[in-house]
Amino acid sequence: MGKYKFADSWLEKDEFKQWLKPVAENNREAYCTYCKKKISVASMGINAVKSHMHGASHKAAVGRREQSQLSIASFCAPTATPLPNTTAELVKTAMTATSAPSSANIRVAMGGTSTMRAEVIWCLNTAVYHHSLNSNEGISDIFKSMFPDSDIAKTFTCGKDKTGYFMRFRLATFFKQQLVDTINKAGPFVLMFDESLNQSTKKKQLDVHVRFWDDDCVQSRYLGSQFLGHGTAQDLLHHIKECVAKLNMRQLVSISMDGPNVNLKLGDLLQKEHAELYIYILHLHLCI
């Protein structure tokens, strides 16, 4: 039995912390997450870890990992235009978008007064951090107590019902139109859909996504959902057409779906309709 044991302090070293892990119930070994391999440290201690790090197989694993990460990031998630993930970034993105022509205007959603603008920003914060609508009950009284000298706080009212109204009929309308404008401007796109049982409503739910090329990368975005009664091919076609009504369907080049017979029938109906309207054959892609 060697005299060395795994030390937690090794995990704090910059050269190790990305890939080195302890082995449960065996403090005489370490684990390399890149190579998927255990390293015995009983006889050499930290020098065994360093020896492994400088080995050809570990360097090759590091190279493969870096190459894989680079290709995915450069293709699907460019750092130049990251998606906003905070309320401040979302408001900034929305306000910047008003410089482009659009049928939806965030300044309309923000309203003409400072109080309404504050209420809309609070609704954005509720959406970004997934707060419940009920959590906004009584928020106006809290703000009045916190900011007694603020004129905005005195007139701020954004309870459960008002928050839901702003999010559904103002903000959602703007961001949906912004997405539609982006898709129509981008050019050819692929339509993807899937139906499943909604556990809350106990009804079939049709989810529609769009994949398109924008800003030098592939974008896959959720477009909308439709609740179904019957699920025949004609019903699916009707609900999909409702969901994509504002898209330029001339630019639709493919549909992606799973393999049930009703979806195959839907593909035939959609292809026939496009052949009549746009005089070309739509490519069908089945995801088995």
Image: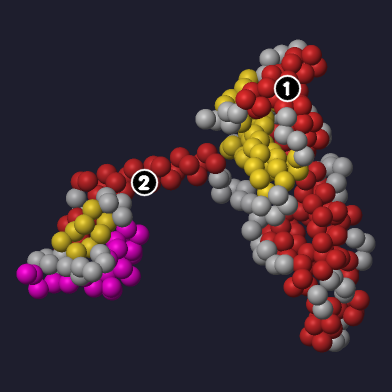
Quarter-of-image position of residue 233:
top right
Mark 1, Cα crowd under 10 Å, few <14 / some 14-19 / many 20+, is many
Q: Is residue 106 left or right of residue 198?
A: right
Q: Which region of the structure is painted magenta?
A: 1-22
Quarter-of-image position of residue 63:
top left
In the rendered image, residue 186, in percent from the top left (x then y), is placed at 70, 33
Relative vertical location of residue 272 with respect to residue 195 in this rendering, above or below: above
Q: Residue at x 66, y 45 (%)?
A: 197
Which mark is nearer the camera, 2 or 1? 1
* Of 189 and 130, the residue lying toward us: 130
In the rendered image, residue 136, in percent from the top left (x then y), is placed at 78, 72
Q: Is residue 190 left or right of residue 165?
A: left
Check residue 16 for magenta coloring: yes
Q: Residue at x 62, y 25 (%)?
A: 261
Mark 2: amino acid: Arg
Q: Mark 2 — residue?
A: 65
Which residue is at the far left?
A: 1
Check residue 32 for magenta coloring: no
In the rendered image, residue 22, in percent from the top left (x then y), is placed at 27, 66
Mark 1: amino acid: Leu
Callouts 2 and 1 close, C-beta under 8 Å: no
Residue 270, which numbered label? 1
Q: Considering the image in quadrants, where does the N terminus appear?
A: bottom left
Mark 2, Cα crowd under 10 Å, few <14 / some 14-19 / many 20+, is few
* Of 27 and 179, the residue lying toward us: 27
Q: Residue at x 70, y 43 (%)?
A: 204
Count of residue discs: 2
Which secondary structure type mostly characterizes the magenta part of the structure?
loop
Relative vertical location of residue 176 with respect to residue 253 in this rendering, above or below: below
